[in-house]
């Protein structure tokens, strides 16, 4: 096994920051606020977004440019940096970092799960989908194998019944900040090898979000909390953005309005729809949609 660059035992003199999405913005800002020298930010390429498909910078690049920090889209530019006193901080980068780079610069990663459970791309989503009661944030050493490095610090976090991916990820992000700042300020004091069953957090697919009304209402709600869960109504895709459970018993997939509430039959109770989005239309309150949908006693959602 190839050796990794040694982790620092004292304050990092310089940092190369590696990350792309919104969740990676707060750690970068916190490091700057603490007076760390950010020598380079490595981030994902600019993408076309929104109407007109204009090319726009990702959240981390936007902040780095505003702060006057040099930005690169090529992870191999790290090899050009002097490794003396340099520490790599990785937050939601999404790309593999080569052995050569890991030998050149010690790197730590902020990972949003109780490792080794949910190694991989979608740890927050998988924790919610699986009905986990708790999770954690871990600061780990970046190793050759994905999310398999030693744990340097961690903090537990309860998953609330109403948590969405956004609310849970934001809470984990806040828990991560003092752990990250402490390691960058004082160096690594302990390294604990991961133990226990390894569970991989695969990327979320459309299949994961397709609602099967023969599932329990609790499982369907977990899909909705992950975001972009969908079913079909009159042959068109129908997204459900927010919902809760109800005790009314209905045939599976059947839509009914009770006391102004839009309910759908599922296993072990029903699902009360709150915010929905018919294909090609904006989000709308479920009750408003139902008033215009001309529902009948036989109206149902289907899987296609």
Image: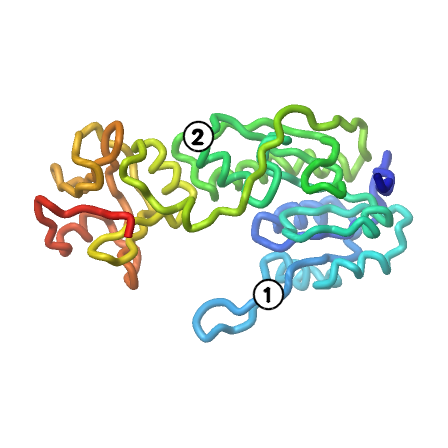
Residue 218 location, quadrant: top left
**Quadrant in which the N terminus appears:** top right
Residue at 81% over, 49% down = 99
Residue to which mark 2 is pinned: 131
Q: Secondary structure at mark 1?
A: loop
Compared across the picture, whether 114 is left or right of 221 comes to: right
The residue lying furthest to the bottom in this view is: 52
Q: Nearer the viewer, residue 93 or 182?
A: 93
Residue appearing at x 12%, y 37% in the figure: 259
Q: Position of residue 284 (x, y in %)?
A: 26, 53
Sequence order check: which comes first, mark 1 or mark 2? 1
Position above or below: 80 against 89: below
Q: Residue furthest top?
A: 196
Residue topped by disc 1: 57
Residue 287 position within the rendered picture, expressed as x and y whole percent measured from the top left: 18, 47
**Does the CB distance between marks 1 and 2 fall below 8 Å?**
no
């Amino acid at each position: 096994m190839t050796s990794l660059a040694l982790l620092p035992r004292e304050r990092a003199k310089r940092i190369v920051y590696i990350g792309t999405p919104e969740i990676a913005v707060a750690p970068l800002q916190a490091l700057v606020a603490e007076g760390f020298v950010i020598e380079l930010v490595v981030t994902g390429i600019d993408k076309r977004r929104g109407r007109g498909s204009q090319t726009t910078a990702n959240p981390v690049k936007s902040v780095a440019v505003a702060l006057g920090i040099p930005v690169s889209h090529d992870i191999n530019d790290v090899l050009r940096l002097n490794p003396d006193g340099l520490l790599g901080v990785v937050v939601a980068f999404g790309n593999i970092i080569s052995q050569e780079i890991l030998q050149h610069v010690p790197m730590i990663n902020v990972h949003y799960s109780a490792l080794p459970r949910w190694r991989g791309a979608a740890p927050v989503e998988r924790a919610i989908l699986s009905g986990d009661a708790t999770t954690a944030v871990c600061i780990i050493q970046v190793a050759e194998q994905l999310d398999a490095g030693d744990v340097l610090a961690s903090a537990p976090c309860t998953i609330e019944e109403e948590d969405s991916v956004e609310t849970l990820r934001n809470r984990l992000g806040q828990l991560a900040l003092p752990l990250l700042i402490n390691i960058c300020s004082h160096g690594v004091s302990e390294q604990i090898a991961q133990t226990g069953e390894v569970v991989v957090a695969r990327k979320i697919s459309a299949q994961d979000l397709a609602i099967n009304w023969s599932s329990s209402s609790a499982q369907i709600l977990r899909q909705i909390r992950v975001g972009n869960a969908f079913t079909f109504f009159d042959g068109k895709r129908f997204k459900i953005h927010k919902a809760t459970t109800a005790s009314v018993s209905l045939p599976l997939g059947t839509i009914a309005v009770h006391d102004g509430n839009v309910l759908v039959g599922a296993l072990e109770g029903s699902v009360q729809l709150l915010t929905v989005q018919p294909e090609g239309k904006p989000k709308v309150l479920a009750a408003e949609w139902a008033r215009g949908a001309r529902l009948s006693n036989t109206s149902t959602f289907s899987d296609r």
